Image (spheres, grey):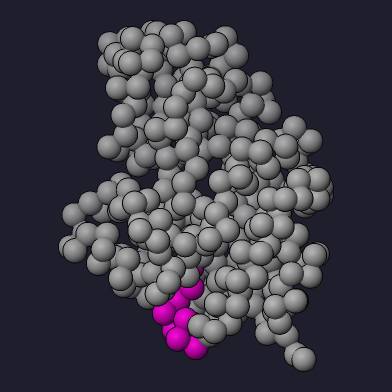
Amino acid sequence: MSLVQLNIMYGHLEGTEGKFARDPSGYLSIDAGIYQKHGLEVSWDHVQGTEERYRRLEDGTAQISLVVGRASLRHFLDSKTTRILGCVMNSCPYYLVASPAIRKMGDLKGKTIVCREGPSRNTPIAETFRERAQLSIGEDLMLQLPKSDQEAFDLLVSGKVSAALLPRPYGFWAEERGFKRITDWPDVVDDPLPISIETTATLLRKRGKDFSTFLHAHREGIRFMKTHRGETIRVLQEKFGHSPSFAGKTFDDYLICMDEELTVDFKHLERLLGQLAPATPGGARKVAAEWIMPGGMKD
């Protein structure tokens, strides 16, 4: 029996020199023969750059892209040409990471913290500092809102600020450099839909059956990854150069957030739209109906 070929694209986290993949599970699934068992021959290819990914989807040299939801949603709102098959990760709350001298939230009095502008919207950052550490933003500490997580990370590691609210991968990266996570910070800052599964409307019409088969196989692959810690850590070290401690944190605190249901959680779609384009006509329900493949969302 001939195998159905699918080219899947994934990206590295910005600024990590290719050392952090948003979804490394495909490598384990290929090695374990999971895709092949389902009649698929899958290539798991790193393709960096949003424009290049969309070019490959449009010309058919790749069929599926694993991409951060905010980039995917922006493209859909601008073009209406893409479709979401599902979501590998609906939510992965940010960590509060600080310079080594900072031990608890109260130590941030008189200091400056940063958080990317998007996740700060409609998020109780000020209330959390007031309730947990009796600190008022604007009086006891300052909050800067850079445009990107990479910029927030750079401000922290360069010593220009004392703490940063960061996506977990950037937090692990900072910890590798000696910065410390403040563990009593709650899960109130998030980047909804950090890994969406995207294709084009044209490809979905042509290859919908193949994509359904891929989703079924990928669910099995994620379950395999989450129950094989040692093999996953080996792949993270060999493919991406993770140290043992970095690989362990990635497995225990990041990959655990991956959801083998591979469906979009509607409440997180609402949150993402509220960050990016809250005035969108019809709101999240209309976006979901147009953008997400039937069966690809859960309420």
Magenta-span inclusion, residue 100: no
Looking at the rendered image, the quarter that the N terminus falls into is: bottom right
Residue 155, compared with residue 8, is above or below; it is: above
Instruction: Look at the image and give the residue range highlighted in magenta.
Output: 198-206
Numbered marks: total = 0
Q: Position of residue 70 (x, y in %)?
A: 40, 54
**Residue 227 seen in this snapshot:** yes
Look at the image and tell me in which quarter the C terminus lies: bottom left
Find residue 297 and report its image quarter. bottom left
Q: Is residue 246 above or below residue 264?
A: above
Give coordinates of residue 64: x percent, y percent.
55, 71
For residue 235, above or below residue 143: below
Residue in view at x 44 percent, y 27 percent? 186
Q: Is residue 79 visible?
A: no
Of residues 229 and 50, the one nearer the viewer is: 229
Predominant SS of the magenta segment: helix
Write the residue at 80% across / 65% down: 32
Instruction: Name the one closer to the observer, 182 or 175.
Output: 182
| Left or right, residue 172 beside residue 273 | right
Residue under the point 38% across and 11% down: 133
Give percent across and percent down for residue 44.
Answer: 68, 66
Left/right placement of residue 117 relative to residue 48 reads: left
